[in-house]
Amino acid sequence: MKVGLSIGGGVRALEGINPADLVEDGFSSVFVACYEREMLWHAPRTADFTRTCQSAGLEVYAVPLGYGRVMDPDPSIDSLYVREHPHHCQVDSRGRRCAKACPNNPSFLEWFASNMRTLAWLLECRGFLWDEPSFYYARGGWACRCEYCRRLFFAEHQQQLPADLDDAVVRFRRSSMLMFLLASAAAIQAVDRRLLSLVMPGSSMSSREAGIGLDEWGALPGSSAVDELSAYASWEQGRTDMETAIRATHEAISTPARKHHKRSVLWIAGSPHPRDKLLDALRVAHLAGVQHLVIAGYQSLVASPAYERFRAPMARVIGQLQ
Ligand SMILES: [Zn+2]
């Protein structure tokens, strides 16, 4: 079983990391968050970091965040594009602009693809993770009803885009999101066709709400936008225990992925705190047949003061599971 680490926190976090230490601690891969705002000024520093990781033997995956906020796992992540192009943003069912660019807006699509091509040129990596792509949805409101979405819907159905989120609209939002993921994968693969496209559907919304969501695990690997399917196994809210969460989530993504000869990547939270039982979770994932497990994230684990005492036992456990 490969064990990876997701690194958020931007270039300041990268400066404190020695990739050779991560290899020594048993990690085989890193998922590096690339924030739209930071990449404007600090892309070379991120590129240097990915190069050092590759040289140390780590597989690197880029996780673009911000960038119009279609990939939107964290509402606190800002996007300059959204600020500067409010007229390219999604329009909700009450006619209000939302703080998310519309994946059907051609100007946004062009800008996004061009930025992803640049990242793919700059960063030495194995692939990109598209983290929680979604349309805007809130109780009583959904997007998108911008002029492009209305035109596209009319062209497909010869009728106006309904005001209610009916089944035709649900299908339209889903296919729009899949087209966006196809365009995203095509952008990076135009630079290097070996670059993998990993998709992590939203962990809290359904497909009806987000376009694609956590109920989409079974169908997504059928899309050529998806080379590997990712999902987050969560047990923090106490609705289920750790072992059940890991086994059930792994089963739900690995079975459909295998059917399409694709791989899956399971994500878990992790810290050195005994309450989090990270070493037990590693063993459970291995027994469940997980091939690539990613620990999110860097701040709670490696940057934690308790990590110094935790790293040797963790490296021993990871070593036993390889
Ligand atoms: Zn739209």
Image (spheres, helix red, strand yellow):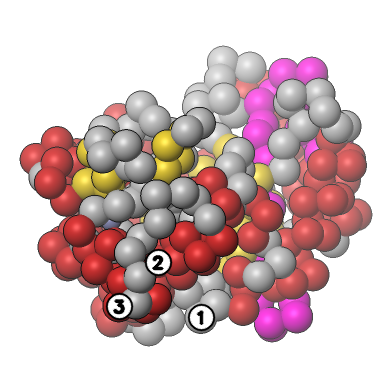
The kind of residue on which mark 2 rests is Ser
Range of residues picked out in magenta: 258-281
Give the residue number, with chain letter if any, for mark 3. Answer: 155
Question: Residue 83: x and y, percent?
Answer: 14, 36
Please tell me whether mark 1 or mark 2 is closer to you in this view: 2
* 314 relative to 46, above or below: above
Question: Residue 226: x and y, percent?
Answer: 53, 72
Front residue of 174/56: it is 174
Give the residue number, with chain letter if any, for mark 2. Answer: 176
The kind of residue on which mark 1 rests is Ser
Q: Is residue 290 left or right of residue 118?
A: right
Looking at the rendered structure, the secondary structure element under dot 3 is helix
Q: Residue at x 27, y 47 (%)?
A: 90
Please tell me whether mark 1 or mark 3 is closer to you in this view: 3
Quadrant observed for ligand 1 in the rendered image = bottom left
Mark 2 closeness class: few <14, some 14–19, many ≥20 residues within 10 Å: many
Question: Residue 129: x and y, percent?
Answer: 46, 58
Question: Which residue is most to the top?
Answer: 305
Q: Is residue 27 visible?
A: no
* Label 2 CB sits under 8 Å from any ligand 1 atom: yes
Q: Is residue 133 left or right of residue 302?
A: left
**Residue 89, magenta (yes or no):** no
Q: Residue at x 72, y 18 (%)?
A: 273
Q: Quadrant of residue 22?
A: top right
Looking at the rendered structure, the secondary structure element under dot 2 is helix
Label ID, residue 224: 1
Distance between mark 2 and mark 3 Cα atoms:
13 Å
